[in-house]
Image (tube, helix red, strand yellow):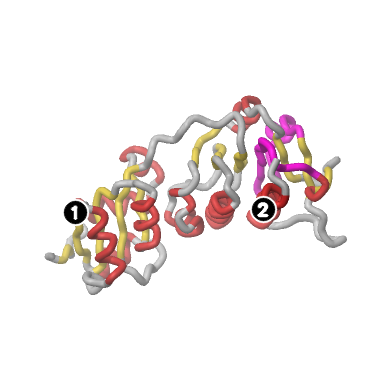
Amino acid sequence: MDIIHSRQNPVFRQALKLSESRRERLKSGLVLLSGTHLALSALHAGWSLQRVLLREGHVGQPEVEQVVGQAGAPAVVLSGALFDEIEQMASPTGLLALATLPEPPALRRDGACVLLDGIQDPGNVGTILRTAAAAGIDQAWLGLGCADAWSPKVLRAAMGAHFAIPVIERVDCAAAMDAFAGPRAITTLDQARSLYGLDLRGDLLLALGAEGRGVSDAVAGRATLRVHIPMQAGIESLNVAAAAAICLFERRRQLLADPA
């Protein structure tokens, strides 16, 4: 295949915009996946890839050829300089893929869901999504003010969780909580019950807020369950992604120990 060297090439320009701009991702309905792991995760989940971009020198590598073969989509080769300009974090596999964003499902009114309220750090958002998928959560909701779920940093931190759990963005947190039929929990130190004294096996909506600020007043006012994680004296809080993991896997532990 010929190698693209020009910054004016439309394939390069589209991919660069997708890597940099949330507006472009929303406008086009496309997302840029970095690396063979994410591309294969998308394919295994039944997603279709619209185009595969390869870095010169990586054509013929087994994982790269596996993606190209399964995708059934056009593949182009970019010069190292152009490829590196698109990819915000270096990938040893030298592959990018354009995928179509799915239409998000309706918000559930039952089951197990996690709501992110104003969490702006991409690493925390991606880690929570990865944890939620591993814990068997049904849906992940991101309120206004959260990091873009489809940004390169969130996608990388989530390690394929986007393809295992429905991720719904721009959620009206207050309305979503009002509509949820089961317990609506927040983590807090104020008038809260210990996580380990609660039965978490049924329907549950767990709302998590940004570190320091916590959930918004609108979310806190709609909580029916206030939860705290017992910690060593003198320690006030945990990283929000760590707190999410503790809560979600305590629920999973209870389910595995004694299914309701």
Vertical side of 130 occupied by 54: above or below: below
User: Looking at the rendering, which quadrant does residue 124 occupy?
Assistant: bottom right
Give x and y (percent) for residue 173.
61, 33
Vertical side of 193 occupied by 6: above or below: below
Task: Provide the residue span drawn in magenta.
Answer: 198-224
Q: Is residue 245 magenta?
A: no
Give x and y (percent) for residue 143.
56, 38
SS at badge 1: loop
Say if residue 14 shows up in the picture.
Answer: yes
Q: Which mark is residue 249?
A: 2
Q: Is residue 200 magenta?
A: yes
Residue shown at 46% from the left, 33% from the top: 105
Read off the residue under disc 1.
Answer: 74
Mark 2 surroundings: few (<14), some (14-19) or many (≥20) residues within 10 A: some
Left or right relative to 12: residue 2: left
Residue depth check, mark 1 versus mark 2: number of the one nearer the observer: 2
- Majority secondary structure in the magenta region: loop
Give x and y (percent) for residue 178.
65, 26
Left or right relative to 156: residue 222: right
- The residue nearer to you, when weighing 135 against 208, is 135
Q: Which part of the image, by quadrant, shows the C terminus?
A: top right
User: Looking at the rendering, which quadrant does residue 203 occupy?
Assistant: top right
Residue shown at 77% from the left, 37% from the top: 225
Say if residue 213 shows up in the picture.
Answer: no
